[in-house]
Amino acid sequence: MRKARKQNGSLYLDVNGSKTPVWKFSWWHILPDGKHVRRKRQVGTLDQYKTEAAAERAVRSWRLAINSNQVHAFSGITMQDVIDHFRMKEMADKGEEGRAWSTRHRYASYLSCWIEPRWGKEELAAIKTPLVEEWLGELVKKPRKRKKQQPAKREQKMLKPLAPASKAKIRNLMSVLFNHAIRWEFTDRNPITGPVRGSGVRQSSKRQSIPDILEVAEMQAIVAELQLRERVLLFLDMATGLRRGELAGLKWQDLDFENLQIDVNKSVVSQVVGRCKTEASQKPVPLDEYTAQDLLAWYRFTPYHQPDDWVFASNSARAGKKRGKQPLWLQTIMRYHIQPVIKRLGISKRVSWHTFRRTYTTLLQANHEDVKVVQELLRHSSSRITLDIYAQAQMPAKRAAQQKVVEMVRAPHSLPQPAVMGA
C-alpha cells in the first residue's frame, strides 16, 4: 500500500441534517488501488467547541493519526473499501491457486445480497460484535421477484427467517473480510471472531431438519422405474457418492474401464467448468464392475462418445448450437425425471442428488467400514466432516448395539424375569 504524503486535513464549520452548526474535519484517504478519496468526520457542535481554536485542539490527535504509519488508526476505511479490495485480490480467477468458481459465486451472492447493503458504508471501527450478532438474528429470506404485486399480508407471511446455516456462512464471510483487512493492515481487529475464543459473533449452523436417507429397498425401487440415462446417472451417484457438479463434469476420457476407476478432475456448476471443491476431491474413485457395465451400455446408446465428450451431454433440441457440447442440467433431470418416479412410488422423503451421497455414507458406516476408508471414498478433507455431517446411524444398527449392552447386563438368571402382562 502506497504511503500517503503528510497532510493537515481541513477543519471547517458546516450544518448537519437538522441544520445545527457543527465542526467537521476532512482529509484525503488513499485506497488500496491508489485512488484518492475525500473523507470527513464530525468533530462536534458549535455549542461544544465555541471557537475554532477549541475545535483545532480536538482534532490534533486525528492529524497525528492520519499521518502515522498505523493506517488503521484513523483511516476511515469502510467495509465497501475492504470488499472492493477483496474482490480485486481474492475473487479473481487465478486458476488452480485461487478459489473454486462455486466458492467465488457464493461469496459474490452473499456480498451483494446481504453484507454490502447493510455494512458497505460503515467504517470498520464502527462494526461491533453485538451489532453484527443482532443483525444476523433478524435476517429473513429475500422475497422472489414476481410480476404481479402480492398482497401485503401474503408477502409478510412469505418472509421466513433465513436458515441458520446460511446465517453462519454470512458470518464466516464477514470474518474472512476482516482477516483480509488485517492482512493488508487496514485494521488490527476482527470483531466477528473476537480476541479470544467465544468472544466473537455467535451464530449456530444447526440444521432445521435432519436430511432424509433412503433405504436399500427404496433405492432399488427407484432404479427399477427409471429410463437408461437416469438409471445410469442415479446408480453412478449411489455407488460412488460423487457430488452433483462432479457427475455433470465427467467426460469419457475420465473413465478408466481397464483399471476400474474414475479420475475426478473438474466440477460443473451452473454450466461453468471449474476445478473440484478441494484437493482431496480430486482423488480417483473406484468403479465397480456393475456400474462399469451400465456406463458401457450408456456409451453404446448415446451419440456423444468421443473421449472429450461429456458422459451426460445435453441432447435436447432446445440447447441449439450447444447441443452435445454442454453437460445436462442435473437439477432439471432430478425435477422432471426422477422426483416424479419417487412420488409415484409413494416415497415421501425429500430427495436430491445429495441424498444419494448421504445414503452412500450411511451404508458404508452400517457395513462397519474403516472411518479412513469412508473418508477417502467420499474425498473429504477431514473424517470429522464424514462422521458429524454426512453419516447417520440406522435404526437396526442402533437396536443391535443396544441389544448387545442389554444382553451383557441381563446375563442368564442374574436378574428376575419381567412378569407377563395379564398373568
Image (cartoon, rainbow, N blue to C red):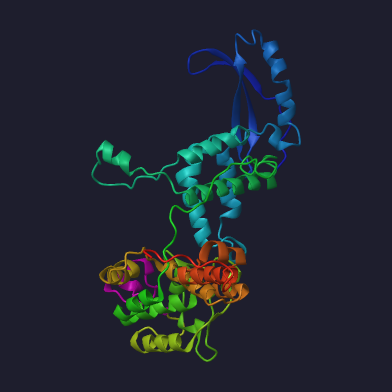
Q: Give percent across and percent down for residue 305.
A: 40, 85
In depth, the one of 384 and 160 nearer the eye is: 384
Q: Which residues are magenta?
A: 310-332
Q: Is residue 356 left or right of residue 282?
A: left
Quarter of the image containing the N terminus? top right
The residue under the point 61% across, 69% down is 279
Q: Position of residue 337 (x, y in %)?
A: 30, 72
Magenta span main SS: loop
Residue 263 x, y percent position in the rendering: 54, 79
> Looking at the image, how many numbered discs can be counted on the residues?
0
Camera-side residue of 56 and 111? 111
Verify whether residue 91 appears in magenta. no
Residue at 57%, 15% in the rendered image:
22
Q: Is residue 261 visible?
A: yes
Q: In the figure, residue 45 lies in which quadrant?
A: top right
- Along the horizontal axis of the image, is 406 left or right of 225? right
Residue 378: which quarter of the image? bottom right
Whether residue 382 appears in this view of the structure is: no
Vertical position of residue 402 compared to residue 202: above or below: below
Q: Residue furthest bottom?
A: 258
Q: Is residue 328 magenta?
A: yes
| 13, 363: nearer the viewer | 363
Q: Is residue 159 above or below residue 360?
A: above
Residue in the picture at 55% in, 68% down: 406
Q: Residue 19 at what x, y percent from top left? A: 49, 13
Q: Is residue 44 above or below residue 159?
A: above
Q: Furthest residue to the front?
A: 423
Image quadrant holding the C terminus, namely bottom left
